[in-house]
Image (cartoon, rainbow, N blue to C red):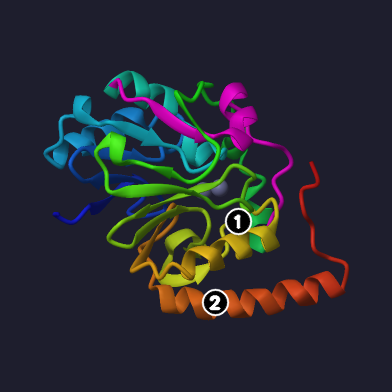
């Protein structure tokens, strides 16, 4: 069987915010960028020689506005069904993220002040409701949707049979991609420890590369080393009573 190709679709900057085009027997799109980027994603799909009407599924990795912001628009432009996890239905149905964001560090505290991250996006109703591991064979892709909760309760990743992990905000590049290839937390996590557990579960499946929402593809070995340091950092924060976790 031919290999599933993972193509980044830049939504902002060269790789500040990415959606992905997965090219298997049929094309699948992962994530839909910020509000108003549907046309940009649509045109890049076309530029890769794919008829947007052939897209079999749009997978939304989680309920943050830079990932689901154009889901409704992209659904209209392609006609493809949209898949989202049931635990992030609130943001999908309201078009609003869960407030407040819980910053992972100074970058998150700074970004929290950006009104765009608190904006209203067009709501959507997922056509495919994800409740657990979901094979994508029916959508023409040799891959599985894997629930990876922690960044948000309804966060998911897509793991191809070839080992590429399209990971949303499970992990990011340092400074949102300004230091390519260096693993870092994204600006926010609802539950940092649960996210780290999800990340380690995915690393245990030996992915060949991690394709992320913010930055360039990450080498799994570098992410493993980062995960060990992050484990220690979270333990120290917890000891100091400074680990914030979303409770609801
Ligand atoms: Zn996010
Ligand atoms: Zn993000």
- Identify the magenta region: 79-104
Q: Residue at coordinates 32% horizontally, 39% vertically from top-left?
A: 29
**What's the residue at 57%, 63% (across, down)?**
185
Query: Residue 26's x, y, as percent?
Result: 20, 38
Would you place residue 55 above or below residue 111 in this image? above
Neighbours of disc 2 within 10 Å: few (<14), some (14-19), many (20+): some
Alpha carbons under labels 1 and 2: distance apart: 16 Å
Q: Nearer the viewer, mark 1 or mark 2?
A: 2
- The tally of labels here is 2
Residue 89 on the magenta segment? yes
Q: Secondary structure at mark 2?
A: helix
Q: Quadrant of residue 192?
A: bottom right
- From the Cβ of disc 2, is ligand 2 less than 8 Å away? no
Mark 1 close to ligand 2, CB under 8 Å: yes
| Residue 43 locus on image (x, y percent) | 22, 33
Q: Which labelled disc corresponds to residue 91?
A: none
Please, is residue 45 above or below residue 145 in the view?
A: above
User: In the rendered view, does 48 fall on the left or right side of 228?
Assistant: left
Residue named by callout 2: 226
Which residue lies under the disc numbered 1? 187
User: Residue at position x 32%, y 25% from top?
Assistant: 80
């Amino acid at each position: 069987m031919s290999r599933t190709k993972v193509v980044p679709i830049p939504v902002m900057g060269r790789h500040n915010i990415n959606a992905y085009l997965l090219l298997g027997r049929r094309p699948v799109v992962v994530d839909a960028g910020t509000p108003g980027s549907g046309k940009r994603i649509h045109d890049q799909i076309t530029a890769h020689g794919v008829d947007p009407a052939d897209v079999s599924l749009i997978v939304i990795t989680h309920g943050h506005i830079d990932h689901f912001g154009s889901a409704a628009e992209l659904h209209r432009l392609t006609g493809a069904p949209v898949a989202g996890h049931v635990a992030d239905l609130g943001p999908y149905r309201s078009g609003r993220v869960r407030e407040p964001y819980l910053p992972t560090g100074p970058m998150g505290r700074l970004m929290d002040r950006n009104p765009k991250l608190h904006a209203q996006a067009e709501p959507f109703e997922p056509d495919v409701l994800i409740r657990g591991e979901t094979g994508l064979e029916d959508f023409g892709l040799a891959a599985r949707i894997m629930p990876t909760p922690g960044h948000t309760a309804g966060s998911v990743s897509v793991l191809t049979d070839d080992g590429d992990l399209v990971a949303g905000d499970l992990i990011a590049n340092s400074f949102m991609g300004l230091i390519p290839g260096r693993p870092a937390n994204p600006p926010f996590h609802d539950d940092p420890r649960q996210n780290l557990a999800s990340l380690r579960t995915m690393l245990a499946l030996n992915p060949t590369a991690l394709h992320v929402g913010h930055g360039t593809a990450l080498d799994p070995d570098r992410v493993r080393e980062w995960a060990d340091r992050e484990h220690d950092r979270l333990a120290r924060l917890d000891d100091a009573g400074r680990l914030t976790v979303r409770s609801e």
